[in-house]
Amino acid sequence: MAVTSTSKRDGLFTNCFKHLQSTLDYVTKYSNNPTAHINSLKGIAKDYSELDITYKRSRKAYDATEKYFQDKDDCIEESEKVFERFLQEEPLRSYENHPIWQAIKNAGNGDATASVELETEHEVDVNRSIEEEGIVPSQFEPPVDPITKKIIQNPCRNQKCGHVYEYDSIKEHLKRIKLNKVKARCPYIGCTNMNMTKSFIIADNELRDQILTYNTQTTQEDFEESTSEIL
């Protein structure tokens, strides 16, 4: 395997782990039902850890096989059998000792959901867990905040015009408007709501759950894409 392939693999796994971390952070902050989502992320972390262990074990056996044949020019042994022999010599490690699993597990247990534990006696069906929480249609795209131009993570809705904002950004927007002593208008271009007040802003828990599920699903898809490029 070329060095560039190994570097690409390391980059893919690093990106996957970053997605796991950011999604876990979102879950612990905003989820109304974090247990299922954290278990889903733990399931992904488990798959990630097992794949990484398998890769490193196979890589060591591959390197040992390559060196073996380099030192034996007249060797007539079959390479597959030599590889299998070296592979069997490599220890089988548990995913529970993998640093990625430990990081996600410990982070998930560091908040109010400390009692949540992954059921390690059987495989966690990540997709099924996500679907049980409510299927998000594939065409769903999380809304973009009109002020920050970033994807909304903690949505709130204007009851008067129906538009959605990031909670922190609209709060700061209204605060700035109040200091200037002028009427606040909805920041969406073309909106006719010219008298926006804090009393009309409410949390949109349903949309928040959709965004949360979307983030979890995207993390799973990124993981599957990275593993398909590696295998």
Image (cartoon, grey):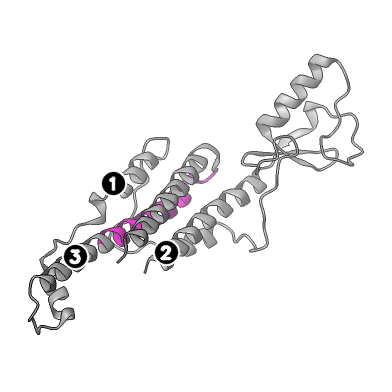
Label for residue 63? 3
Type of residue at label 3?
Answer: Asp
> Looking at the picture, how far across and down is residue 177, in whole percent?
81, 21
The boundaries of the magenta stretch are: 32-53
Asked if residue 41 is among those painted magenta in the image, a careful observer would answer yes
Query: What residue does disc 1 label?
Result: 99
Query: From the viewer's perspective, is the residue at label 3 or at label 1 nearer?
Result: 3
Question: Which of the marked residues, 2 or 3, is nearer the chain's N terminus?
Answer: 3
Type of residue at label 1?
Answer: Pro
Q: Work out whether 81 lies above or below 182.
A: below
Circle 1 Cα neighbour tier, 10 Å, few/some/many (<14 / 14–19 / ≥20): few
Compute the Cα span from label 3 to label 1: 24 Å
Q: Residue at x 31, y 56 (%)?
A: 49
113 vs 50, nearest the viewer: 50
Is the Cβ of the residue at disc 1 closer than 8 Å to that at disc 2? no
> Looking at the picture, how far across and down is residue 65, in whole percent?
15, 70
**Quadrant holding the C terminus:** bottom left
Type of residue at label 2?
Answer: Asp
Question: Which of the marked residues, 1 or 2, is nearer the chain's N terminus?
Answer: 1
Q: Work out whether 131 lies above or below 173.
A: below
